[in-house]
Image (cartoon, rainbow, N blue to C red):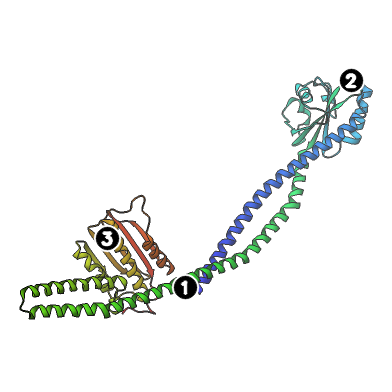
């Protein structure tokens, strides 16, 4: 139970860490998105402010400003000083069609001509605006140096005579930073709180889900173990019935046939009886081999070592060189012994049917924490299209259901290695016989 609680705790902890990671990532992404939106909104505000200011100036501009008329210039200066030059606008220019500065809040700039002004005017249509970070090193911005980062916004206006002029404002870029910070302060906490609330909601949901998954896995393990127990009991019953019934009867029949052969005087009849006795003894050996395959009768009585010896004895008669090394012949506990025996049985069967091996090495050993079984052959090994069959797949499932490890890999120097590792948790409760 403690292990299962720890497993659920680890699952929830992982979920919580993933939630924190998601919060960090989403918050970071949200910060940059909100920051971008804030900058865009601030620039849009600067465009709107310049467009509104241009409409005010357009109502007071006259054709005389194109000729440098002092009265016309004074009218523009008055409306700009009174209605336009207020924070965040710090400088204003009015450009002629040829790029001449017709008005500037810096009188030294009036009358100077720059191609950039004419170019901007040519590119803008009515009610269009253009905004960019001011290049204070450009010649036309000589008198704006020292004002800090500025945002230039352009828009066209018209004189009463229909001539197009370019109205330009310089706005403090710090005002955009202020609007950006204000928007971040407004929305970022909401985003973070919402994400944390979602994470807090996911933790109990994750806990419930982990418990359900754990309960489902436990129920599957219990169902599998019940089916395995039923299967083992049925195997044991069948093996016992065969051993106590047909095997004993056939063994007795073999002995009676041998005795009859010795007591008869007819050579032909004697030969038939001897051959019959030999055939019956062969059937007895076949049945005993089958019984060992179904359920080894000496697994519980003598332990894992003798059971594996019986399992592999017939292989030696079939020409396969078998090396068997069991460090503790008495075994490692009934549950572990039964499963290791089944794994070895399936591995041996796989070797005989598919490997084409000449040698088979079986090792069973124990460490402080687990029992280990290794079955290695020198056969054709694992091909590129190798897929474990149903038997080996079942063994993997059974081993992993007991929290063990199952591995199929190439052997050294050639062949296949099948390894099963099982924890020794039941060794004290179910001591070796």
- Give the CA distance from mark 3 to mark 1: 33 Å
Which SS class for mark 1? helix
Screen quadrant of the C terminus:
bottom left
Contact between labelled residues 1 and 3, with CB atoms less than 8 Å apart: no
| Residue lying at 36% horizontally and 51% vertically, measured from the top left | 385
Nearest-to-viewer mark from 2 and 1: 1
Nearest-to-viewer mark from 2 and 3: 3
The foreground one among 394 and 27 is: 394
- Give the CA distance from mark 2 to mark 3: 109 Å
Contact between labelled residues 3 and 2, with CB atoms less than 8 Å apart: no
- Residue 352 numbered mark, or none: 3
Which SS class for mark 2? loop
Query: Which residue corresponds to mark 1?
Result: 222
Instruction: Work out whether mark 3 precedes mark 1 in sequence or the reverse, and give the earlier one.
Output: 1
The foreground one among 60 and 170 is: 60
Packing grade of label 2 (10 A; few <14, some 14-19, many >=20) is some
């Amino acid at each position: 139970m403690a292990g299962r609680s720890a497993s659920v705790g680890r699952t929830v902890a992982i979920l919580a860490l993933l939630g924190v990671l998601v919060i960090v990532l989403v918050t970071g992404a949200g910060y940059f998105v909100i920051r971008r939106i804030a900058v865009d909104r601030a620039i849009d505000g600067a465009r709107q402010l310049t467009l509104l200011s241009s409409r005010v100036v357009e109502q007071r501009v006259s054709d005389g400003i194109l000729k440098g008329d002092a009265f016309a210039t004074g009218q523009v200066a008055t409306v700009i000083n009174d209605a336009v030059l207020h924070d965040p606008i710090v400088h204003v220019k009015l450009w002629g069609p040829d790029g001449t500065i017709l008005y500037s809040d810096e009188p030294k700039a009036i009358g100077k001509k720059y191609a950039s002004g004419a170019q901007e005017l040519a590119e803008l249509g009515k009610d269009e605006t253009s905004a960019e970070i001011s290049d204070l090193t450009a010649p036309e911005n000589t008198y704006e140096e020292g004002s800090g980062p500025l945002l230039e916004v352009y828009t066209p206006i018209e004189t009463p005579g229909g001539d197009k002029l370019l109205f330009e404002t310089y706005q403090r870029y710090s005002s955009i930073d202020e609007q950006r910070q204000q928007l971040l302060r407004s929305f970022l906490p909401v985003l973070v709180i919402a994400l944390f609330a979602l994470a807090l909601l996911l933790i109990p949901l994750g806990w419930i889900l982990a418990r359900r998954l754990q309960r489902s896995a436990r129920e599957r393990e219990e169902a599998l173990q019940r089916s395995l127990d039923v299967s083992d009991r049925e195997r044991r019953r069948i093996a016992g019935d065969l051993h106590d019934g047909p095997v004993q009867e056939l063994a007795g029949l073999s002995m009676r046939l041998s005795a009859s052969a010795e007591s008869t005087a007819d050579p032909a009849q004697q030969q038939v009886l001897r051959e019959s006795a030999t055939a019956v003894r062969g059937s007895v050996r076949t049945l005993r081999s089958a019984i060992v395959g179904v359920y080894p009768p000496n697994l519980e009585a003598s332990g894992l070592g003798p059971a594996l010896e019986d399992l592999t004895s017939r292989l030696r008669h079939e020409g396969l060189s078998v090396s068997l090394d069991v460090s503790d012949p008495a075994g490692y506990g009934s549950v572990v012994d039964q499963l290791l025996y089944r794994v070895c049985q399936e591995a041996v069967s796989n070797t005989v049917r598919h490997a084409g091996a000449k040698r088979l090495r079986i090792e069973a050993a124990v460490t402080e924490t687990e029992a280990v079984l290794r079955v290695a052959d020198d056969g054709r090994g694992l091909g590129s299209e190798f897929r474990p069959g149903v038997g080996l797949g079942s063994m993997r499932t059974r081993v992993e259901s007991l929290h063990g490890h199952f591995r199929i890999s190439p052997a050294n120097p050639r062949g296949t290695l099948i390894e099963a590792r099982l924890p020794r948790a039941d060794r004290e409760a179910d001591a070796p016989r």
